[in-house]
Image: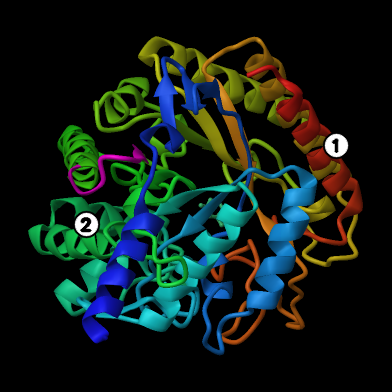
């Protein structure tokens, strides 16, 4: 009886895992494509999707289902989500982590991503799944180096030494031990069988791409030619490795574009020239990068937006040259005057969202190499009770990660004026003939 049952299960599993190659996302020149039609990303960022999907006390499946229903109603068709985090001791990292040490994984938490993937499939939402982080809020590359070197990972929010932090992060690429351990984690995630659906991730058509990391950079502002060369090789070799595990899905870098490439167009183009990198990514942070001053909005708006416009458009021109699709997968702006208070107005944010959406929508409609966007980020029904707006273990997860004040950039479900703009442009994007 057991033998028959196990044969039946195996057959069912095979059936569950049976797929049609045409169901997978791919590219068609400078366009993303699926089932023979152009695909336009109308997305958001929800790094914590797997956390909410966990069955353990850190999860909140009822909230996740509600958030995904609301995002679907907004016209969202793609979510960028973190696959793995590394346990870090500092106060800017998420707790718990999916990885507590090399080979030491929190399966209950990892299974949260399974639930998330099962739920987005029900809503025809795709996912970009990133496998590491150049920054400290999920442990990331510096935590790998901390485990190897036996020294605590730096928190640049405390040390204020962002240059030193970025150099340490980038040393990850040169560490054989780090790469060996990371590839074991990559293999564990990419070849995973979804414990909710029984479907292997390799055969899950909801995955738009595996992404190397969140915002990987070649080094700090003084990255050497050697560091740039190592970075480009790391991208190619890792993307090739992922394709060797998973012939069905695309691979992307998670790059911020020129501002994450030392403003070196050759580095950005070389980083995306690999045949194993299927499309290009960029991010845009006009306040983080000092183009707009949240304390002096009226005085800095025009110059900031001029730079934003240039940034939005120059990458589309580069993508056209490289002949690969491009996705703006992060952008955002603070609440007015940089308030974190959910009751604060969002006059400048709403203007900014409209300009970004309109600029990209018009170039997508014109058939250019831009394949869509993800706003950063979805806070939804999350709320903070902290007077200092700083995330602590057990607090609601929101789009603002633990390295930043909760409410900085994320869109709450009460931000009606912004949500209406998101919906307005989602409708326009979905109306573009494919
Ligand atoms: O990936 C990122 N880019 C910018 C976000 C806002 O500062 C930040 O929270 C995140 O690390």
Q: Secondary structure at mark 2?
A: helix
The residue tagged 1 is 298
Circle 2 packing at 10 Å, graded few (<14), some (14-19), many (20+), is many
The image's colour scheme reads rainbow
| x 56%, y 89%: residue | 57
Where residue 427 sits: x, y (%)?
A: 79, 32
Circle 1 packing at 10 Å, graded few (<14), some (14-19), many (20+), is few
Does residue 213 appear left or right of residue 303 in this picture? Answer: left
> Where, quadrant-wise, is the C terminus in this rendering?
top right
Span colored in magenta: 244-251
| x 43%, y 53%: residue | 129
Q: Nearer the viewer, mark 2 or mark 1?
A: 2
Along the viewing direction, whichever of 344 and 290 lies nearer the viewer: 344
Q: Is residue 47 above or below residue 2?
A: above
Q: Is residue 361 above or below residue 76?
A: above
Q: Is residue 178 visible?
A: yes
Does residue 97 appear left or right of residue 42 in this picture? Answer: left
| x 63%, y 73%: residue | 397
Magenta stretch: includes residue 152:
no
Where residue 72 sits: x, y (%)?
A: 73, 50
């Amino acid at each position: 009886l057991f033998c028959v049952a196990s044969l039946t299960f195996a057959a069912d599993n095979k059936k569950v895992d049976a797929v049609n190659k045409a169901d997978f996302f791919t590219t068609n020149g400078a366009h993303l494509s699926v089932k023979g039609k152009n695909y336009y990303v109308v997305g958001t960022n929800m790094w914590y999707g797997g956390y909410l999907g966990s069955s353990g006390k850190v999860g909140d499946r009822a909230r996740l289902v509600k958030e995904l229903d609301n995002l679907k109603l907004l016209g969202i068709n793609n979510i960028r989500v973190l696959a793995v985090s590394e346990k870090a001791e500092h106060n800017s990292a998420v707790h718990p982590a999916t990885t507590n040490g090399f080979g030491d994984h929190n399966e209950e938490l990892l299974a949260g991503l399974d639930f998330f993937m099962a739920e987005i499939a029900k809503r025809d939402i795709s996912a970009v799944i990133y496998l590491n982080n150049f920054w400290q809020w999920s442990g990331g590359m510096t935590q790998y180096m901390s485990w190897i070197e036996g020294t605590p990972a730096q928190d640049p929010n405390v040390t204020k030494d962002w240059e030193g932090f970025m150099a340490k992060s980038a040393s990850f690429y040169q560490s054989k031990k780090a790469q060996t351990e990371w590839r074991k984690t990559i293999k564990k995630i990419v070849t995973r069988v979804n414990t909710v659906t029984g479907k292997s991730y390799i055969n899950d058509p909801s995955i738009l791409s595996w992404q190397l990391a969140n915002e990987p950079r070649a080094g700090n502002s003084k990255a050497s030619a050697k560091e740039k060369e190592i970075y480009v090789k790391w991208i190619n070799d890792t993307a090739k490795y992922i394709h060797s595990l998973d012939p069905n899905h695309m691979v992307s870098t998670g790059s911020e574009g020129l501002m994450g490439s030392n403003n070196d167009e050759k580095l950005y183009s070389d980083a995306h020239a690999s045949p194993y990198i299927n499309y290009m990514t960029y991010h845009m942070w006009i306040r983080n990068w000092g183009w707009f001053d949240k304390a002096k909005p009226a005085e800095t708006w025009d110059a900031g937006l001029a730079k934003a416009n240039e940034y939005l458009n120059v990458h589309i021109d580069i993508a056209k040259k490289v002949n690969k699709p491009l996705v703006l997968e992060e952008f955002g702006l603070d609440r007015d005057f940089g308030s974190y208070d959910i009751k604060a107005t969002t006059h400048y944010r709403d203007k900014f969202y409209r300009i970004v959406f309109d600029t990209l929508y018009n170039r997508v409609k014109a058939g250019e190499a831009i394949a869509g966007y993800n706003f950063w980020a979805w806070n939804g029904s999350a709320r903070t009770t902290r007077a200092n707006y700083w995330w602590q273990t057990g607090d609601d997860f929101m789009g603002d990660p633990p390295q930043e004040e909760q409410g900085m950039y994320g869109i709450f479900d009460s931000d009606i004026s912004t949500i209406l703009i998101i919906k307005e442009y989602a409708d326009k994007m979905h109306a573009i003939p494919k």
